[in-house]
Image (cartoon, rainbow, N blue to C red):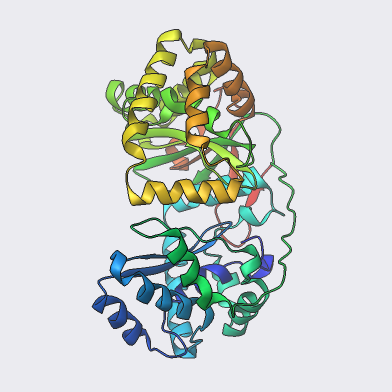
Amino acid sequence: MLLEDPNKVGVSSLLDNMLMEGTANKTPKELEEALGELGASLSVFSSREFITIRGSSLAKNYGKVLALMEEVLLEPRWDEKEFDRIKSSALNSIQQSNANPNAIASRVFNNIMYGDDHIFSKPTSGTSESVASITLDDLKAYYNNNFSPKVASFHFVGALEEADVMASLDGLSAWEGDDVEFPNYEVKTKQDGSRIYFVDYPGAKQSVINIGSISMNGDNEDFAAATMANYRLGSGSGAILFKKLRLEKGYTYGAYSGFSRTMNGAPFTASSSVRTNVTRESVDLFKDILDNYGEDFSQQDLETTKSSILRSNTQSYETMGSLLNILQNISTYDLPTDYIKKDEERLKNMKVEDVQKLVKEYMDPDKLIYVVVGDGKTQLNRLNNLGLGKPVVVNKDEKKLTIDK
């Protein structure tokens, strides 16, 4: 997204679909059949900061699948008919998301968190207006300007010898590209201090609650420690948010919190979807838990965190996917190859006051933004007097989010 024209957000999302619609030498059907004959998979997907091409195959078919990946990467088909179909599908998906309370909550939340001028304030898929304006030439220009080996990294996991992998990359020697300059976007959160925002979704049977703040960048040396500090709060069904909101109160099917690792403005978030008639009670309970989590964190909480994380780590890094994720973290965030071991050592040496310091710095309750999407007629006035100020009403129109003063 960082490399997209802010007026044409959605180019990279369309491009990830376009790249799998055949190659210069293969129709979409022929590409699909070639992968099927090898029992392999190949996919392209985009996110805020990356476009990723990922393949999986039997080790004996590695070379053939890599050759297909090279075709997808270096020889796009650029079929106008396929582009029209993909664009039409994207517009339909955007239209559907505009009626989805979770999508609305995410869009409003990101806009408030990052500010109007930040590219991350917009959905990765773009808006109806931006996608409608995108042409196949826009995709070609994005590809020609930004696909470069100088900003690419390769990760391999499997029954492969290093020398064979290095030799296999000779096929990419013809890939040329210039340096790619990424723009710098400044995060301008719309609110100093904690505040609640409300989006009216008439007749909603559930209310969506998103809470958070921009905490750090993904290469922050405290990222793993902050994730550990969050463990007792919202990491899963054994954490405080889940126990309080679902098991004790029955307000929801689940409530969670955590950190999203991105280089540019990594957020801490807590979220849930709750029954409409307990919207205020849920927000109040969220606030009470988040306000007091650091202060209430105990030695027993710390021991539980250490035991659970260290035990799960012994199993978490045995799958292909988890090993691939480790390699990606190392290359993306410039981590040492033994960063997992170092993170575990830091966890073992943590004290209660260390966790409390991390909570205050990266999960500061005085900086958390609350966004609620729900039935305004029955719930808006109930959200007064929560210690978050009068709810700020936000217009959910995707073209331009506006705040009622």
- x, y percent for residue 340: 48, 35
Question: Observer-nearest residue: 354 or 201?
Answer: 354
- Point out the residue furthest to the front here: 163
Among the 4 quarters of the image, the one containing residue 196:
top right
- x, y percent for residue 225: 54, 27
Question: Observer-nearest residue: 313 or 11?
Answer: 313
Question: Observer-nearest residue: 10 or 105?
Answer: 10
- Point out the residue furthest to the top here: 299
Image quadrant holding the N terminus, namely: bottom right
Residue 265 vertical position relative to residue 46 in the rendered view, above or below? above
Tell me the residue at 54%/43% (across/down): 261
Tell me the residue at 53%/12% (across/down): 351
Question: Observer-nearest residue: 324 or 375?
Answer: 324
Residue 359 vertical position relative to residue 314 in the rendered view, above or below? above
The reply to whether residue 102 is visible in this rendering is yes
Residue 328 vertical position relative to residue 126 in the rendered view, above or below? above
In-image side of 112 versus 83 (left or right): right
What is the count of numbered marks? 0
In-image side of 255 versus 386 (left or right): left
Image quadrant holding the C terminus, namely: top right
In-image side of 261 versus 248 (left or right): right
- x, y percent for residue 62: 35, 69
Among the 4 quarters of the image, the one containing residue 239:
top left
Residue 344 vertical position relative to residue 146 in the rendered view, above or below? above
The reply to whether residue 203 is visible in this rendering is no
- x, y percent for residue 227: 50, 31
